[in-house]
Image: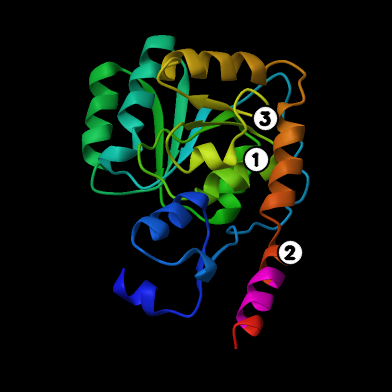
Amino acid sequence: SNSLKRARMVIVPSQGLYDLCLNWGVREEKLRLIYNSVENVDSINLPTDHYEFDLLTVCRLVTWKGVDELIEYCAERNFNLVVAGDGPDRERLETLTRNLGAKVTFLGEISNQRVNQLFSKSRVFVLNSYYEGLPHALVEARVAGILTVGREGTGSEEVINDDLDGFLIRSDRPLDATLDLAIDAAGKPNVFTQRAKLDSLSRFNKEHNFHEILNTIQGNN
């Protein structure tokens, strides 16, 4: 925090980090909020009558990502889950999958191209993380046109407009109820994914946000 206080300008990629810097004593006039960015991807024709996976998550396999809860949900509902990412919890999660007889596919670390392919094969993208800055994979999923679910009180809340273009797991609506809503909504014609794509391409636009960073740096010299 001392280094941040000494800096002439501090650029942060989320409101959560902005507020954290204020709590650390960084003066507000030195702070600039400029979101992380994504590029528009080629339109993906999402299937309307068949999905290879009910749920997709892309994350590091550590405890606070909440993947174990997704596995338990899929075991209870007889849904299938694909997990992209690796980490120290993988062996424990694979053991849980076997013990519950859940239908889970662990892919480990995969390329961005393969992740984009998963967007077109999956019904719902979910990030059940309890701690999150501004989740890049969540923004990319929204740009790709897949219905998204995150958790309130994390950076996902800054990305998803709850009940308008996605769903947030909340204290008054737990994970199973939220995912039930999302999976039901994904099977119907709705404007959620259209709203999500337009919102993400507006707020997380690479060309615009890089221009803002350049202007901020030049204006501070």
Upstream in sequence: badge 1 or badge 3: 1
Q: Are marks 1 and 3 in contact (CB under 8 Å)?
A: yes
> Where does the image place residue 30, in percent across and percent down from the top left?
51, 71
Identity of the amino acid at label 3? Answer: Asp
Identity of the amino acid at label 2? Answer: His
Identity of the amino acid at label 1? Answer: Arg
Q: Secondary structure at mark 1?
A: helix
Span highlighted in magenta in the image: 211-217
Residue reaching furthest to the bottom: 221
Residue that mark 3 sits on: 165
Name the quarter where the N terminus is drawn: bottom left
Label 2 to label 1: alpha-carbon separation:
18 Å
Residue that mark 1 sits on: 142
> Where does the image place residue 185, in percent across and percent down from the top left?
65, 17
Q: Is residue 38 above or below residue 62?
A: below
Q: Is residue 57 above or below residue 55?
A: below
Mark 3 crowdedness (10 Å alpha carbons): few <14, some 14-19, many ≥20: many
The kind of secondary structure the magenta stretch mainly shows is: helix
Upstream in sequence: badge 2 or badge 3: 3
Label 1 to label 3: alpha-carbon separation:
9 Å
Q: Is residue 20 above or below residue 131?
A: below
Residue that mark 2 sits on: 208
Q: Secondary structure at mark 2?
A: helix
Upstream in sequence: badge 2 or badge 1: 1
Name the quarter where the C terminus is drawn: bottom right
